[in-house]
Image: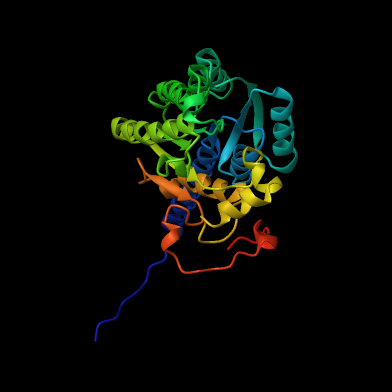
Amino acid sequence: MMNYYIIFKPDLFKILFTNITQNTMNNNHTNQDNESVYESEKKVAVITGSSKGIGKAIALNFAKSKEYSSIVINSRRIGEAELVVQEIKKTTSCDSIAIPGDVAQEKDCIRLIGETVDKFQRLDVLVNNAGIQKEIPLTETTLQDWYNIISVDLTGPFICSREAVKQMKIQNNPHGGCIINISSVHQIIPRPHYVPYATSKGGIEMMTKTMALELATENIRVNIVAPGAIDTDMNINLRTNAQERENTLRKIPMGRIGRDVEVANVVEFLASNKASYITGSTVIVDGGMTLYPSFSLDYDHNSTQIFPKNNVA
């Protein structure tokens, strides 16, 4: 039978213990450095038309998510934009500034992106949300009506995206970025008396797909969120006109009007790293409006419940 002996050498043990302790400290230091880098890489976002409605809801969602260091609020009305900035700063740890501008004007779009980059040195997310509509029969639609709507709803997103991509292509840690265009179910569903509006939304769809294909190798994702009937000031008639409300509800299988935060939740997801493999896609937020509701089962809408409570499933 063989005997084994353990020889304890204090000096050797001291060296081994010192090395282990030093490696542990180095690893902890590295982890802290990584956390600091992660904190410094929080995103910067620009949201056009974000002083109210869907745009404001998106801005607040971004700020509360803790994924953003800075949110830029844009509106033609600086006073309304500043109110959103104050709300973000008061209720979250996110920084925010207001940059006024009309996305129908090229110089304003260029200035919006330029001032954002000058202030924060990067731009990670652009949400082209600003939009207008006007109900007018085709034969009464003037060329100015056409230009007014197309310039805000289609040309503005093009210019803002063009300028944002110039920055996204050259920035690192991370390289690239994300563009989300707020469209409408009317990129799919024709809408009489809204020819310029529906045309602009159809254009947004193909512009988004083409940009997504062109920019994919640059790690720049481009997607669409297409809302249906949402309770915003743009759809004020759904609150004030009972007949219009009932007509709209008949087109929505879920039997209710959507809320701005329900759109904002989808935008927040698409702008996050959880959607890192999604580009060139449209996410429709419409309660089923685009599902040919005339083929659905009969249902009775209770008009007293058309605007949902806050507890959205």
Query: Is residue 219 visible to us here?
Result: no
Q: Where in the figure is residue 109, as x and y percent of width and height?
A: 52, 19
In this view, 38 is above or below 247: above
In this rendering, is residue 256 above or below 87? below
What residue is at 45 percent from the left and 35 percent from the top? 198
Residue 71: % across, % down: 60, 33
Image x and y of residue 200, in percent: 44, 30
Q: Nearer the viewer, residue 2 or 106?
A: 106
- Does 235 sit above or below residue 253? above
Relative vertical location of residue 168 with respect to residue 297 in this rendering, above or below: above
- Report the residue at 48% width, 53% height from top: 289
Q: Nearer the viewer, residue 301 or 70?
A: 301
The one of 255 and 7 positioned closer to us in this rendering: 255
Residue that sits furthest to the left in the current view: 1
Left or right: where does residue 138 sit relative to residue 233? Answer: left
Q: Residue furthest top?
A: 107
Q: Residue at x 37, y 45 (%)?
A: 278
Residue placed furthest toward the front: 139
Indicate the quadrant containing the N terminus: top left, top right, bottom left or bottom right: bottom left
The C terminus appears in which quarter of the rendering?
bottom right
Q: Is residue 27 left or right of residue 205?
A: right
Q: Quadrant of residue 304?
A: bottom right
